[in-house]
Each structure stands twice: as C-alpha cells, then as structure tokens.
Image (cartoon, rainbow, N blue to C red):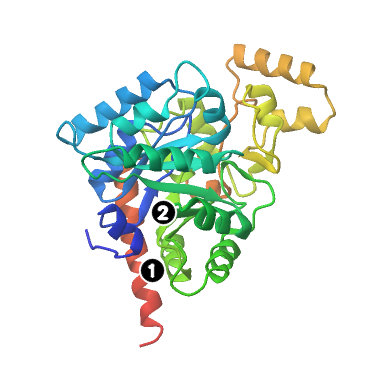
Amino acid sequence: MERITTPITELLGVPSPIILAPMAFGATAEMSTIVYQAGGFGMIPAGFDSSAQLKEYLTTARKSLSIAEGAAIPVGVGFIGWILDKTEASPDPRLPTVLAQRPAAIWLAFGASLGRYVAQIREFDAQRTDGHRTLIFTIVNDVEGALRAAGEWGVDVLVAQGIEAGGHGGSEALPLLSLVPAIRAAFPPGTCPPIVAAGGVSTGAQIGALLVLGASGVALGTRFLYTHESCYTKEMKEVLVAATWGATTRGLMFDEVNGTMGWPPKHNGRAIANKIVQDWEAGLGLGARLERFEESKGRGEKDRLVIWAGVGVGMTDEIRALKDVFEELHSDAVKALRVSSSLLA
C-alpha cells in the first residue's frame, strides 16, 4: 500500500487516512479490525450495547489483531452522547469498562453533555500508570461546535460532518465542501486540530479531494454498508443496491417508529425514503404510523425498513468484501492526489 501521510495517519499510526465510522446497527468489531489490517482505522459502535458486550467486542478485536493483554488496541469506540447520559447514570456505566480495555480512541457525538465525557476520559487517563492517552474524536456540524470542542474541551480530532451524512447529524449542517474550510478558517494558523471529513463520501476521488481541501482523514459509513461484513440484513442491502440518486431524506419520522428518539435539538437522521416517509407526509398520527410499521415488519416487507444511508447511495450497486472496498478506495484516493498534483506540472 502506498502511504498517504497526514496528521491523522501520523496520530493513529496507519498508512491510510480512511476511517470506518461507528455505525450503530451497521458496523461491527470485526469490520474495525479488517479496516485496520487493510491500513485504515476502525471505530466500533457502542450503540445501546452493555458494558459487557463492549468489553467482548474489544476482547475480540485484541485477539484478532494479536495485541498483547494490557497493550493498547488500535481501534476506537463510538458513543452517542444522549445514550451515554442514560447509561452512565445507570448501574451499568460503560465508559470506565471501555477505557480499561485501552482502545486507541473514543468517538463522541450527539449530546448536550459531551464536554463532561471528554473530561471523564482525560481524568481516567490521568490515573493510568502506563502513560496511555486516549485520542478523542468529536463530531461537529458547525463552526461554533468546532471552536467549543477544540477550545473548551480540548479534543484531539474534529469530525466535520456535513448535511450529506447518513444516519444522524445536524439538521442544519453545512455541506461538507463548505464545512471543512469554514472550520479551518475559524482557527488561527497552526492551531486547528486535525479534521476528519464525513458525510456522503463514496469514492476514492472524493477522499482525495477532501484531503486537498484540508481534511486530514475521511470517515465513511454508508459505503461500507455495501459489504458482506456489514450487519445490515440481506433485505436492507438489497434496498441499498437498488437505491438511486435522491433516494434518501432527513427527518425524525424514522426514529419515531423505530423507538430511537432522544436526539438533541436540530438533529435528525438521513435514511432511505420509503413508506415511513409517505405515512408521515400523509399526516398520519404516530399511533397509526407505528401500527403500519409493525405490520409491515411482521410481513417481512422491505418498504418500511429503517435503512440509514447517506446521499452517496446512487454511486454503488454491488455488495463486496470489505477489504476489497477499502483497498479500492485507498488506491483511487492515491490516484486522485496524483492527478491534482499534476495540474501544476
């Protein structure tokens, strides 16, 4: 593999700036290890899973990568802030268990108390005797959020998530091509933390363009759902493969029927537009929409599945092995970077 050197690859000790996003209900610990072995960095989604489950995922990753007990594991774990607000006040707090396993990074997103968890991670690390320092990634959807995350909380990496992203994010986020330079311009020269660009990215050419734009890394989610290893069901993958441009939309109607409400203000989710959206647009009350959703699920129908996906769904039409997809993305990013540099020749 031809190495792409950026602040992110140096920070993570990997040759590729491509990151597997922590997609709850979509990504797995196995996927994170495959991405790492291929040259990138993978994030394990915490979702609603218990501390015991998360410990098991990290133990599996440690064994798969042949990492000695007690050594840092070169994967990350992604937490959703509003879910942390519930679990960390419960009899089963998850952060201490995960941090004790020494993952290389923690990814925080979507919560009103993220700064508190940044401080908790720093405090946990300060008590270690081996000097391990957990890298903290935080999703930001605007300049104000980026300045707060870097200035007040002191995070290590800003994940600039554009409006194009699948799954959840800021409902008023800028498009990615505007968000990345806007964040960089908000910091005095030399003071901006590394930026990971995220949102609707499906090709190596896009990755190369974002690196030229000023991102140090690129996180992909939806593109990696088109793999055999993704835990999306066969039916969900069939819908993804058949999806065309404009097949997604944003809103809370998906969460309302899926039982996953709790998102902060000005946040919602992007998913495949289907009869869930039609029911909502028809003005049906939540009770009626839930009834139709459950009946459709019981019949095994595909037209009311909640399928989180970004705007790039129209660029992919086959399911492949994750390793092959990753290697193609990296190779195409290298080609794109070569083309951009040749323009000045």
In this view of the protein, which residue sits in the foreground, 79 or 237? Answer: 79
In this view of the protein, which residue sits in the foreground, 66 or 186? Answer: 186
The amino acid beneath tag 2 is Asp
Which residue is found at the position 56% from the left and 64% from the top? 183
Quadrant (top left/top right/bottom left/bottom right) for the C terminus? bottom left
Going by the image, does 102 lie left or right of 192?
Answer: left
**Numbered-mark total:** 2
Image coordinates of residue 276 in percent, x first then y, are: 70, 28
Image coordinates of residue 295 in percent, x first then y, are: 67, 13
Name the secondary structure under disc 1. helix
Image coordinates of residue 280 in percent, x first then y, are: 78, 30
The amino acid beneath tag 1 is Ala
Circle 2 residue: 156
Circle 1 residue: 336
Q: Residues within 10 Å of mark 1 (few under 14, many from 20)?
A: some
The residue sitting at the bottom extreme is 345
Q: CA distance from mark 1 to mark 2?
A: 27 Å
Q: Depth-wise, is mark 1 or mark 2 nearer the camera?
A: 2
